[in-house]
């Protein structure tokens, strides 16, 4: 099949999932056309069957104080769909991608039956879609998609609740993980500290809902009992606050801010515990990546996280404000080797439920279903 994929190219789960999906579909013989304003961060230099089409952002004109990106995107989606004879346009994150794709499909008209699939990732529904100014247009674009998927049961339910759209027919297809890449190493590398030092890791885009300062607070509590370092991967609005807190607590030599990195697997493979105390998380792709590498996860029991992390098995889930509970669970895991090994095994087993081989065929089946009508 010829499949167009639109996503945000920036650091974030939706762009990562969209790109990994494109790469996996390309390996399975589909022709993939990625349409966005920049090459997604998970797209390598060259991959067979994968083509990138940049949205033209150069059309500045004094009158256009705000560049109409949604329109420029619709134009590019329309152009690529026609030229490459796309069967399906699969957009990730509803705002504004689904609306632009709707426009592209309308412009093509009935001669070329382009099918539109929208995958909802989280904040497009829980925050942005509910914003008054975006509500109607997001609901409209979702209802006019040929198929809609959500990455967790939680998000599927939230979408019905937020939009009350009985015509949406949302299918749940969870995020997936390539177990050949994300795997535990027999011989774990020692990194970030002397042998015996536990490595605690957090990866995110440091937006307020990720609560990176709370990651630091939890770590500070853990360190009172367990010798450990904290490795923070990513960047975003809360980094300055987290850096200031680290200084205020006097733990600078135990905390590493690594910034944005395209590849995190080697860091995960060298870590002992993943922290994710988010206030909201439709799925928690970072937690899945960590579990696949054999790292137990301590996180908040919100959104879709309980569908990914099994409390008491592959890690521990607590109320988002229960920082003591998260620190206690982390200490219990890190100071009892047998317990940690059991959680490591459970994490790998749980991650296998979301393997590429199990999940990607669900998207292929959906494409066939919409194309064959
Ligand atoms: O969480 C973010 O800040 C990024 C956001 C995105 O859209 O890129 O992530 C969302 O999609 C991911 C992939 O499906 C999910 O794993 C995240 O849980 C979800 N984030 C939220 O719901 C806050």
Image: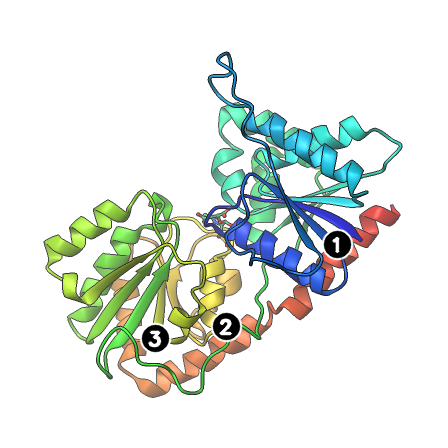
Q: Is residue 83 visible?
A: yes
- Cα–Cα gap, marks 2 and 1: 28 Å
- Say the numbered circle drawn on residue 2: none
Residue at image coords 88%, 49%: 372
Mark 3 is surrounded, within 10 Å at the Cα level, by few (under 14), some (14 to 19) or many (20 or more) other residues, namely many
The x, y position of residue 266, in whole percent, is 42, 72
Q: Is residue 165 visible?
A: no
- The residue at which mark 2 appears reads as 292
Q: Earlier in the sequence, mark 2 or mark 3?
A: 3
Residue at image coords 40%, 58%: 261
The image quadrant of residue 198 is bottom left
In-image side of 326 versus 12 (left or right): left
- Nearer-the-camera pick, 155 or 183: 183
- Say the numbered circle drawn on residue 272: 3
Q: Earlier in the sequence, mark 3 or mark 1?
A: 1
- Helix, strand or loop at label 3? It is loop
The x, y position of residue 38, in whole percent, is 54, 42
Nearer mark to the viewer, of 2 and 1: 1
- The residue at which mark 1 appears reads as 31
The x, y position of residue 279, in whole percent, is 38, 49
Is 360 rendered above or below residue 192? above
Indicate the quadrant containing the C terminus: top left, top right, bottom left or bottom right: top right
- Helix, strand or loop at label 2? It is helix
In-image side of 252 versus 199 (left or right): left
């Amino acid at each position: 099949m010829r499949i167009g994929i639109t996503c945000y190219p920036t650091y974030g789960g939706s762009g990562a999932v969209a790109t990994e999906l494109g790469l996996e579909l390309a390996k399975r013989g589909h022709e993939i056309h990625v349409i966005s304003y920049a090459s997604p961060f998970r797209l390598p230099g060259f991959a067979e069957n994968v083509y990138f089409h940049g949205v033209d952002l150069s059309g500045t004109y004094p009158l256009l104080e705000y560049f109409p990106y949604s329109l420029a995107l619709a134009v590019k989606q329309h152009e690529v769909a026609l030229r490459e004879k796309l069967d399906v346009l699969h957009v990730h994150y509803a705002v504004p991608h689904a609306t632009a794709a709707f426009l592209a499909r309308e412009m093509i008209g009935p001669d070329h039956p382009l099918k539109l699939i929208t995958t909802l990732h989280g904040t497009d529904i829980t925050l942005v879609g509910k914003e008054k100014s975006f509500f109607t247009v997001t609901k409209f674009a979702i209802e006019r998609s040929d198929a809609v998927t959500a990455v967790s049961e939680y998000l599927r339910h939230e979408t019905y609740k937020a939009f009350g759209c009985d015509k949406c027919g949302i299918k749940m297809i969870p995020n997936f993980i390539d177990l050949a890449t994300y795997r535990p190493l027999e011989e774990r590398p020692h990194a970030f500290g002397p042998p015996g030092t536990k490595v605690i890791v957090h990866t995110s885009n440091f937006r307020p809902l990720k609560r990176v300062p709370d990651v630091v607070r939890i770590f500070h509590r853990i360190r009172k009992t367990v010798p450990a370092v904290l490795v923070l991967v990513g960047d975003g609005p809360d980094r300055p606050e987290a850096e200031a807190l680290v200084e205020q607590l006097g733990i600078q030599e135990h905390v590493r801010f690594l910034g944005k990195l395209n590849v995190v697997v080697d860091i995960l493979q060298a870590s002992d515990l993943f922290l994710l105390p988010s206030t909201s998380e439709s799925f928690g792709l970072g937690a899945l990546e960590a579990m696949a590498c054999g790292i137990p996860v301590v996180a908040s029991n919100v959104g879709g996280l309980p569908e990914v992390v099994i409390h008491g098995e592959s890690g521990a889930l607590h109320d988002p404000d229960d920082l003591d509970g998260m620190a206690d669970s982390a200490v219990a895991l890190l100071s009892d080797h047998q317990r940690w090994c059991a959680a490591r095994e459970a994490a790998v087993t749980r991650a296998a439920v979301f393997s590429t081989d199990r999940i990607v065929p669900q998207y292929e089946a959906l494409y066939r279903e919409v194309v064959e009508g």
